[in-house]
Image: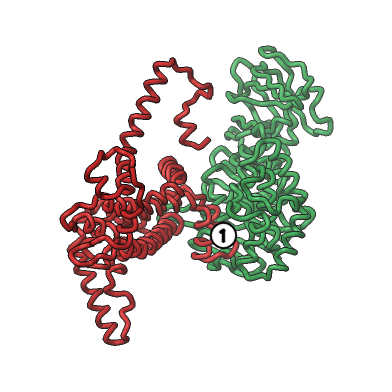
Amino acid sequence: MATLEISALRKRFGSLEILKGIDIALEKGGFLVLVGPSGCGKSTLLNTIAGLESISSGEIRIGGHVVNDLHPSKRDIAMVFQSYALYPNMSVAENMAFGMEMRGVPKSERQKAVAGVAKTLQIEHLLSRRPSQLSGGQRQRVAMGRALVRQPHVFLFDEPLSNLDAKLRVDMRVEIKRLHQETGTTIVYVTHDQIEAMTLATKIAVLKDGELQQVGSPNEIYNSPANLFVADFMGSPAMNLLNGKVSRLNGAASIVLERKDHPPIVVPAPSSADSQKLVEGSNVIFGIRPEAVNDRESIDRNAKSVATFDAKVEIVEPAGSDTYVVTHVAGKEMTARMRADTEVRVGENHAFALNLDKALLFDPQTTRRL
Amino acid sequence: MSAADAILAGPSREPTRHSLTTRIVIYGLLVLFAAVYLVPLIVMVMTSLKPLDEVTGGNMFALPHALTFGAWVKAWGEARIGVSETAGIKGYFWNSIRMVVPAVLISTLLGALNGYVLTKWRFPGHKLVFGMMLFACFIPFQSVIIPMAVILGYLGRLGNQLIDLTGYSFGFGNSTVNLVIVHVIYGLGFTTLFFRNYYEAFPTELIKAAMIDGASFFQIFRRVLLPNSTPIFIVTVIYQFTNIWNDFLFGSTFAAGDQSPMTVALNNVVNSSTGVVEYNVNMAAAIIAAAPTLLVYILAGRYFVRGLMAGAVKG
């Protein structure tokens, strides 16, 4: 049975609907990441789970109990906030014990619980300090400690890493992942950073304008996005999305990508799409991730279907580990992710190869994947 | 370096080099203005330490020849106040303390509570309520005197009835209690304004964290909000203390006779002459009357500027 179940959840502010019918279930020990652009409702959704905001209709169950009308403190949750929200007037130990103190847990038990969690998080030497005497990473740890010490059913994280600098963010990301693996806690995590979502989650929910776009494993979200929004949002650099037309020759469907000053690129329809549904002459959007675009020598040798074409290199971005090469296809920019030592020059023609096993087709009208 | 120093020092950390003349002009002006502000206080202190014949016969700026604290003792314990009484100002001093301490604490705590609700427990119409509380800051003293007198009259009659019923008035009708009520009501607009602006910038996530931790409305107020309100608390206390201690109009209107506050008594000391004006006693009484506000500023003044700045920048 799922530890967290959200069904048909709606949230309205007057006539404005913030959440438009959300259905998500999370099993015990799962790591759900809510991801989406700002204003998509992901933080509101987290707040409704926490009980900090009421819901207009629907149901939230935690550990099998409906918690719709329960006070936040009675929902068996703990939350880590973006600003960490450590009480400035209390020491680290007092911060961690405050929740138990409010629940009337005896002092000796409180101290024992705090000491145990402090050991796990290696913050024992900080226990008597005030939050103002801690670094960003230490505050982050204490905030997690305060949540852990309560041993709740579900942990809620509200963009916990967004106040840290880039290096510390990567360190803490690993730390959170390790913590999750070691303690087997159930976590709901909000972020706008798709890399955090991919690396941490066992399950990702992508939201846009208060609507759930797709729920699935990181692999499903990345490789089989349900629609154009998910395809475009997840992955960096973003998926190449090109305008194409279906052409049927001898029953086999192929996709024609028109180009200015060059002959069109014609590729066989990707295996991911149901070729029976591709109607001759209809418009489609051809999506392919930068790592599935390469030069002829370096394209995945296990690829079953590869298409090649020549195009003029417009921009070369060396990123250290890879080199991003930008060209123009079908009126749009197309980014290829090549080896760092690839020899490409701006303005010259280069031979590109597409790994069609990884290509996807989308309906331009409904934006759904075909 | 405090925020104020940093702003005054300007963007450059390098000490600017002034020519000698510029420096003489700057320091000369500073000394001049300091003197202008200090002269009245110096004259008051010196006069209060002289015997009366030296005051009436001598130079106002001359140092006392025969140093005496007689005027202070007289002002405190024996000075004539009003027509018949000669008990000094000490009773009135305690009247003021008994009035000012509860009035300051109650109005400050209620202001903090109002600010807490108006920022962290918002309800429909909170802006209107705050607007009306703000309006209370602009109501002139004079216009509330008669309505206030009517209300205090009701409370006095209620006190009399309570005495008839229980033998005890529960403070209704008592002049000091009346003044506390008046000052709390009149000060509430200001204290609410101060605390609302401060709490507006107070991180709401702390309140949410405390809610999840299971703290109640008042537990959040007492354990999370108040301990982190020291600067604004001190600003409000100084402001309220100064205003209430220095108030004359309400004191002279709503308190009678030996229940009057210090300011009213001081006026009576100065006005009750028996032929000779005892300037030394008057000066000593005036210094005693001013001492508590001075003390509050000296003890907490540095928070005052800091707190006002915080409100100004964040609010």
Q: Residue at x 31, y 47 (%)?
A: B50
Q: Residue at x 47, y 28 (%)?
A: B9
**Residue A278 image point, x, y percent:** 63, 39
Quarter of image, res B115 = bottom left
Q: Residue at x 80, y 34 (%)?
A: A304
Foreground residue among A265 and A105:
A105
**Residue A204 image point, x, y percent:** 67, 49
* A83 shown above or below A313: below
* B2 shown above or below B273: above
**Residue B243 image point, x, y percent:** 32, 53
Foreground residue among B67 and B288:
B67
- Chain that is green in the image: A
> How many numbered marks have been drawn onto this rendered protein structure?
1
**Residue A26 image point, x, y percent:** 68, 58
Q: Secondary structure at mark 1?
A: helix
* B203 shown above or below A55: above
Q: Residue at x 53, y 56 (%)?
A: B227
User: What residue sits right under mark 1 in the picture?
Assistant: B210
- The residue type indicated by label 1 comes to Ala
Foreground residue among A146 and B79:
B79
Q: Residue furthest bottom?
A: B165
- Chain that is red in the image: B
* A162 shown above or below B74: above
